[in-house]
Image: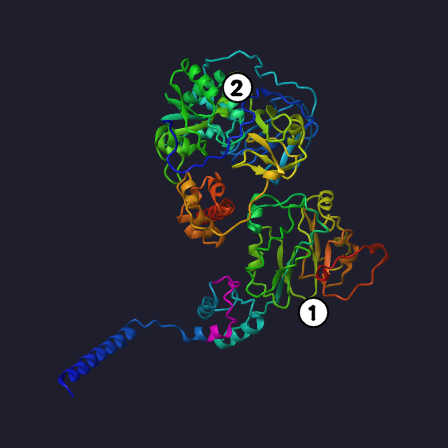
Amino acid sequence: MSDTLIYTVLVISTIGIISALILYYVSQKFKVFEDPRIDIVEAILPGANCGGCGLAGCRAFAEACVNANELKNLFCTVGGNESMDSVATSLGLTAIFKAPRTAVVRCNGTCAHRPKTSQFDGASTCAIEFSLYSGESDCSFGCLGLGDCVPVCNFDAIHLNSVTGLPEITDEKCTACGACVEACPKMIIELRKQMPKFRKIYVACMNKEKGGIAKKACEVACIGCGKCEKVCEFDAIQITNNLAFIDSEKCKLCRKCVSVCPTNSILETNFPPQKIKPEAATEKYNPIEA
Amino acid sequence: MLKTFKLGGVHPKENKLTADKKIIQPPMPKTVSIAVAQHIGSPATVIVKKGDQVKVGTHVANSSGFVSSNIHSSVSGTVVRIDDVMMPSGYKKTAVIIDVENDEWDESIDRTPDLITETPLDAKAIIQKILEAGIVGLGGATFPTNIKLSPPPGMKAEILLINGVECEPYLTADHRLMIEKGDEVMVGTSLLMKALNVSKAVIGIENNKPDAIKNLTQLARKYKGIEVCALQVKYPQGGEKQLINAITGKEVPSGQLPISVGAVVDNVGTAFAVYEAVMKNKPLFERVVTVTGKGLKSPSNFLVRIGTPVKDLIEAAGGLPESTGKVINGGPMMGKAITTLDVPVQKGTSGILVMPESESFRSEEKPCIRCGKCISACPMGLEPYLLMTLSAKKIWDRSETSHILDCMECGSCAYTCPSSRPLLDFIRLGKSTVSKIIRSRKQ
C-alpha cells in the first residue's frame, strides 16, 4: 500500500469522525423537546388536515389537546366521538360527547322551479357572481350554481347535480367540517344535527322577502305563511323575516310540516313515502331523485 | 405635444354618437323611485312617509352620518310607499317611490335663467350649501362633495382640477354640459376654488372635444385663475390620479388620496351642480344622462330627474331595438349590465348604453401567454396577470403586498388581454376580500 493511500484514508476518516461528533453535539444541544403524547394523539386523529376544528391541521389540534386541561372546546368533527374518546383516554381526560352533525343545502331553486331572468357571462365562480349582482333569477337569496362549495370539500361529500344545477351532499361522507359553509357567499349551507338513517327535514329556502315576491321568483319558495309553525307539536319551527326555520335539535321527524307546506318548500330526505293527505295533494319534488 | 398620464392606457373606439345632440328633457315619468343610497357612505334616513305630498326639491331623506348625503325629491306628487327596489347595481335597495303629479317646484328654488356670478357667501357657507343640496361626485363615484372640499387637518389644497375628460366611449353628458352651460361651469369652478381657498384651477378636456375646449378656453378669459388644458385622448385619462399626473406631473403615492399632493379633482357636472346649489338654491335632483347605442333610433343627451325608470329613457330614445344583447348602466369600460329595465336613474348614472347582441359577448377564456400586455396597459403600474392568479388561488397576503388595493377597476387590462382572461373579475374579488381582511384586522 502506498503512502498516498494511507494518508487519504486517514484524512477522510478524520473528517468523517469530526463531522459526526459535530453533528452529534449539535443535535443534542438544539434538540426540540416535544411531548411524546402529541405523536400518540396525532396518530389517533383522522389526519385530514381539514381545519374543521378551527386549528391549523391535525398536529396543531393534537398539540392543543395535550396542552389543555380539559377537552371542552376541542372537538374533531371528522373523527367524531369515537376518536375523541380515544384521545381522552390516552391523555387521562374526560371526553365531551357531541351529537354528530351534517350539512344541508337550503335551496331547491332548480332550473324548473326558479326561472332564469338574466345570463351571467363573467368568470365561473360563485364568489365573483355574488360580487357583481344578486343572481341569474329573481330570487336574490338562492344558490348561484357555480359550485364554489365543491372543490373545498376534503371528503368528496358535495357535488353539483348537473340536472338541477344545485349542490348535493352525500351524508355518509360529510364530516360537518364547515368548509362548504364558509365557501358559499350566499350562506345557504347549514350545519345541523345528524338524524338516524341520515334523515332530514329542512326548509329548502333562504328567501326573506315577502311571500308574494318570493313565490314569483321561485315556485318552491318559503312564503312565510306560518302553517308549519302552527302544526309543529314540538315547537321546532320559527318564522323570522318571512322565512321558516326548523331547529334540528327539537325536530322529531314527524313530517307534519312537510304535508302542510303550500309551496312544497320543506323537504324530507331518506324517508319512505308518506301517505298523502287530501288537502296536501300537490306534486312533491325530491331532489335526490332528480 | 398634448399632455397625458405616464403609465399605461388603452385606446378603445370612441363611438361618441351623441356628441352633437343638444341636451333635451324627456317626458315626465309617471313614478320615480329615489334610492336612499346613491352615494358612498351610509344610506340616508327617510324623513317622509306614505301619503306625504312633495314638491320638486323637497328634502326626503337625511344624511345619516359623516360620510352620507341628503336626498331630495325630483318630482312633485304623492309618496306611494317606501320599499326595496331593484337598482342598477344588481341588488335590491330601499327607495322612496313617488307618483308624479304636475311639476311644482319648491318656492326657495330660483328658476330664472340669468347667470349669477357673485356671492357674499364665504368658503364655509359654500360648503354648507353644497352639503344641504346633497351634492355628490357626478363623475360616477358619488363621493359627498362637501367632504372632499374639507381636507383633513395638516393637508391643504394647492390646485383644483376640473374633470371634463369623459374618457369612456359613448358618453357625452359632460361634453354637452361644457358647450351649453359653459358659463355656469366656470362660476361653479370659481365657487369650488373659493371653498378650497385655492387660486388656481385647471379644466382638463380630452382632445376629441374641440368645441368644448374652444368654448371654455374663451370663457376662461373672464374668470380669474382658471385655465383649460387639452389632453391626449387615452383611456382612462378621466381617472383622478391620471388627471393629476397629466396636468401637474405629480404622482399620488400608493394608498393615498389626491389631497396628499395638494390636488382636489371634481367632475364638470359636479361644478355645474355646485353653481345651481349655491347660486340658485337648487338641490341635486336632476342630471344629464347620455342614452346611446348603435341601433337606437334617437340616441340623446337627456336632462333626467333622479329616480326616472331606465325604461322611460329608452322609450324616449326610440324604444329598445330588437337586436339588443345588453343594457349597460354607464360606459362600456366600467359600466355594469342591468338585469331589468325597471331600475331607476341615480345621481351617479352618467349614461345608459344599449348594446347589440352581436357585441354583447365574452370571448372564450384561454390560458395566460405571459405577453405582458396587461402590465403595459395598467394605468396604476400593477401586474394584473399576477393579481388575478393570486385572487384565484386565494393568496390574500401576497395580493395585499402586490398593491391590489391600488387598482381603480378601469378594465384596461381585461380590454387588452389577447387571451380574453377575466382579469378584472378576479381582481375585484381580491380587492373586496383583502379590504375585509384589513377591516377585521383593525378591530
Q: CA distance from mark 2 to mark 1?
A: 71 Å
> Which SS class for mark 1?
helix
Answer yes or no: is residue B32 visible: no
Marks counted in the figure total 2
Looking at the image, the residue that sits furthest to the right is A278
Q: Nearer the viewer, residue A15 or B112?
A: A15
Q: Quadrant of residue B240?
A: top left
Which corner quadrant holds the C terminus of chain A? bottom right
Query: What segment is highlighted magenta in the picture?
Result: A40-55
Q: Is residue A54 magenta?
A: yes
Q: Relative to A26, does residue A189 appear above or below in the rendering?
A: above
> Local crowd at mark 2 within 10 Å, few (<14), some, or many (≥20)?
many
User: Can you name the residue that lies furthest to the bottom here?
Assistant: A1
Secondary structure category for the residue under label 2: helix
Using the rendered image of the protein, determine whether residue A201 is visible from the camera's viewpoint: yes
**Local crowd at mark 1 within 10 Å, few (<14), some, or many (≥20)?**
few
Label disc, if present, on residue A286 of the rendered structure: none
What residue is pinned by disc 2?
B276
Measured as percent of width and height from the top left, residue B75 is found at: 64, 23
Residue drawn where x is 74% and y is 49% of the image: A219
Q: Chain of mark 2?
A: B
Name the amino acid type tagged 2: Glu
- The chain carrying label 1 is A
Contact between labelled residues 1 and 2, with CB atoms less than 8 Å apart: no
Q: Is residue B311 magenta?
A: no
What residue did someone put label 1 on? A197
Does B332 sit above or below residue A222? above
Our reading of the magenta stretch's main secondary structure is loop
Residue A236: which quarter of the image? bottom right
Amino acid tagged 1: Lys
Q: Nearer the viewer, residue B135 or B228?
A: B228
Residue B329 drawn at (x, y percent): 58, 34
